[in-house]
Structure formats: C-alpha cells, structure tokens
Image (tube, grey):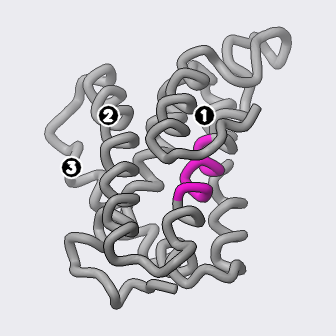
Amino acid sequence: MASKSDFSVEEWGLLRDAPHFVVVAVASAGGSGLFGSLKEALAPAGAMIEALKGDNALLRDVCQKDEMKAAVESLKDMTKSTTDYEALKAFFRNGATEKSRAALDLLKKKGAPGDTSAYADFLMNLGNRVANAAKEGSFLGFGGERVSEHERTLLAELAQTLGVQQQA
C-alpha cells in the first residue's frame, strides 16, 4: 500500500485535501440550518476514525490529526479572498469532483493495488455520511427529507466521478 512518503508535496496535498472538498461541498449543498449544519460537520469523524483503524496505510495517513489540520488550513488559504457564499459553494462543489478525479488519476499511476478503490469508497462514504447526518427543510425536527435534491445530485456526480455505486 502507498503512504504519504510515496508522493510529492503537491501530490500529497491533493490526496489530503480532496476528502475535505467532498465534505464541505455536500454540507453546503443542503439547507440544514444551524443544528443540522453542526451534525453535518461532525458526520465525517466516524469515517475518518474507521480509516485510522483500517488496513489501508494511505487512508490512515490522510486521516492523521496533523494532516486534517493541514487540509483545513489549505482550504482556508484557497478561499480567504472569497466572501460570496454562492461562489464558495460553487468552488467546493466543482473542487469536490475535480480534486476527487485528479486524486484517483494520481493513485492509478502511483498508488498500490487497492488504494484507488479504497480511496474512492472513502470519499463516497464521507459524502453519504454528511448528506444523511441531518434532515433538510425541516422545522424543529418535523418534516423535511433526509437527503436534499441538491445533495442527491452532488452525490450522483461524485459517484460517477469516482466510479462507485451511489448508496441510497
């Protein structure tokens, strides 16, 4: 299995940042309100803990605490000059698919067998966990839907990009 040391600084930045693009893109695709947004912010933690305990060295490296902090700082640097919410949503939505595609292409070239599918499954798992974390369009917990139409569309695009099955 590949690990951080198998990639250049730029390549590693791509592999490290792509999961965070997916999380932010899915979280901003729906309208969850304050409490829903908090749930969505915490949703990826379970997937990252599972990856830290898993067999794939690449995913363990991506999910290390220092790497997650570096990814957050990287995303902040990329967006610090943008204050328009719609522009930020579009940036993360486009980035989620573009970075995911580029990361998979990189892993096909430099990763070990199994890394590409493990990474793709990890990204899809993150997106699904965020989308399913909170109801969209509910009022005080009543009504609404678990996954919004915007989230479903984004997840379908992501699944196609990753070449994985979209979960229900």
Give the side of residue 86 with respect to residue 54, left or right: left
Determine whether 46 is above or below 34 in the image. below
Q: In the rendered image, which quarter contains the C terminus? A: top right
Q: Earlier in the sequence, mark 2 or mark 1?
A: 1
Give the side of residue 115 with respect to residue 166, left or right: left
Q: CA distance from mark 3 to mark 2?
A: 13 Å
Residue 121: x and y in percent read: 61, 56
Q: Residue at x 69, y 44 (%)?
A: 129
Which portion, as a residue range, is magenta?
Answer: 120-127
Q: CA distance from mark 1 to mark 3?
A: 22 Å
Determine whether 128 is above or below 105 in the image. above
Q: Residue at x 33, y 59 (%)?
A: 105
The residue labelled by disc 2 is: 94
- Mark 2 and mark 1 in contact? Answer it, CB < 8 Å: no
Residue 124: x and y in percent read: 59, 47
Say what secondary structure mark 3 lies in: helix
Q: Amino acid at mark 3?
A: Met
Q: Residue at x 28, y 52 (%)?
A: 76
The residue labelled by disc 1 is: 37
Mark 3 neighbour class, 10 Å CA radius: few under 14, some 14 to 19, many 20 or more: few
Say what secondary structure mark 1 lies in: helix
Quarter where residue 34 is shown: top right
The residue labelled by disc 3 is: 78
Query: Closer to the observer: label 1 or label 3?
Result: 3
- Mark 3 and mark 2 in contact? Answer it, CB < 8 Å: no
Q: Which mark is residue 154?
A: none
Total count of labels: 3
